[in-house]
Structures are given as C-alpha cells and as structure tokens.
Image (spheres, grey):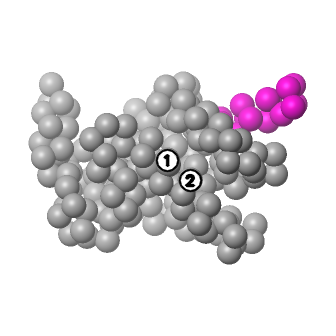
Amino acid sequence: CRTQALNLLSQQRLNWRFMLAHPAHLLALGFGSGLAWVLPGTFGTLMGWLLYLWIDPYLSGDQWLWLILVAFVVGAWCCQITGKALGVIDHGGIVWDEIVAIWLVLFIASNHFSSPLAQLACVVVFRFFDMVKPPPIRWFDRHWKNGFGVMFDDIVAALITLLALAIYIHFVH
C-alpha cells in the first residue's frame, strides 16, 4: 500500500516542469519519453532506438562502447537523483536505463540485425525480458535499490536479449 501511495504521489509530480528542473531529470526521463502515461519503458526503449539510428552513422565501434559506458555511469547518478526526487527509486518514468540497454543490444546485434524490421525484433525481445524480468533480472530489480541497480537490471535484460538472439542465429538463421 505504501509503494502504491508513493507511486500515485510521484505521478502527480511527474511532468515537463519537473523534468526540466534538473539536467538529471531530463536524462533520466529520456528527454520526455518517460512522461508517457502508458508503457513509459516502451516509449523510452523506442526513444533509445531513435537515438541509436540518429547517432550510429557518426560513431565507430570503440566510440559506441565508450558512449554506452559513460551513459551507464552518468545514468546511475541521474536515476538516483530523479528517483529520490520522485520518492520512488525505480519509478516507471525513469527510462534512461532502457535507452542505454537498447543501445547495447542494437550495437552488439548490428552485424546480424541491421534492417529496421530486424532492429524492431531486437526491441521487442528486449522489452519482453525487461517487462517479464525472469531470473536473474528480477533479483537485481528487487535487491539493488539505487541508481546503479536501476541501470544494471536493464543491462542484464540486454545481455539475456543478446543471448536469445545468439541462440536464434545459431539454430534458425
């Protein structure tokens, strides 16, 4: 009951004014994609896909790895700040974790999944694992309640997505 009350209270605070009040909020809320009233994680993942498509032509493989690493570290800080301000550390509107995780999936899978339809498949598989949270994702989600934990459980979902895609490539493709 307390968590539901905190979520309702934080939903009232979650708006454009809140997002623009601090750079950490702007990033954590995925430049506004986390403000969606339904499925903010999906909107955040779609924002991540759009950003990937926009940025990818300008970055080498090494630059992508550095961007993902820096985005993870900065994201842990941003998610911690924003979660504290909202009163719910892993608030649904915080979507930077989905953005960074889908970057990792799309970057690593790009050799085999480069067409828009194949990338959409990557997005769908990632969203499945991120929403269902099978073990070990669920364990990290429940036990690491800080900005790092918010980011890390989505990286685990990304790694499981990549494992599923590798199995698909091995047996089907």
What's the residue at 43%, 36% (across, down)? 141
Looking at the image, is 94 positioned above or below residue 168?
Answer: below
Front position in the image: 25 or 84: 25
**Where in the figure is residue 100, as x and y percent of width and height?**
54, 55
Is residue 4 found left or right of 35 in the rendered image?
Answer: left
**What's the CA distance linking mark 1 and mark 2?**
6 Å
Tell which of 120 and 84 is nearer to you: 120
**Span highlighted in magenta in the image:** 160-173
Crowding around mark 2 (Cα neighbors within 10 Å: few <14, some 14 to 19, many 20+) is many
The answer to whether mark 1 and mark 2 are in CB contact below 8 A is yes
Among the 4 quarters of the image, the one containing residue 158:
top right
Q: Secondary structure at mark 1?
A: helix
Main SS, magenta region, reads helix
- In the image shown, does 3 or 13 lie closer to the viewer? 13
Q: Which residue position is annotated with label 1?
A: 45
Q: Residue at x 71, y 41 (%)?
A: 118
The circle on residue 49 is 2
Tell me which corner region of the image, top left, top right, bottom left or bottom right, holds residue 6: top left
Quadrant assignment for the C terminus: top right
Residue occupying image coordinates x 20% and y 52%: 14
Residue 134 is at least partly visible in this image: yes
User: Count the marks: how many?
Assistant: 2
Q: Is residue 30 left or right of residue 54?
A: left
Q: Find residue 93 and report its horizontal and vertical position in percent.
A: 31, 47
Q: Secondary structure at mark 2?
A: helix
Kindly identify the amino acid type of the residue bearing the numbered disc 1: Thr
Q: Residue at x 58, y 49 (%)?
A: 102
**Residue at the limit of the structure toward the bottom, as seen here:** 58
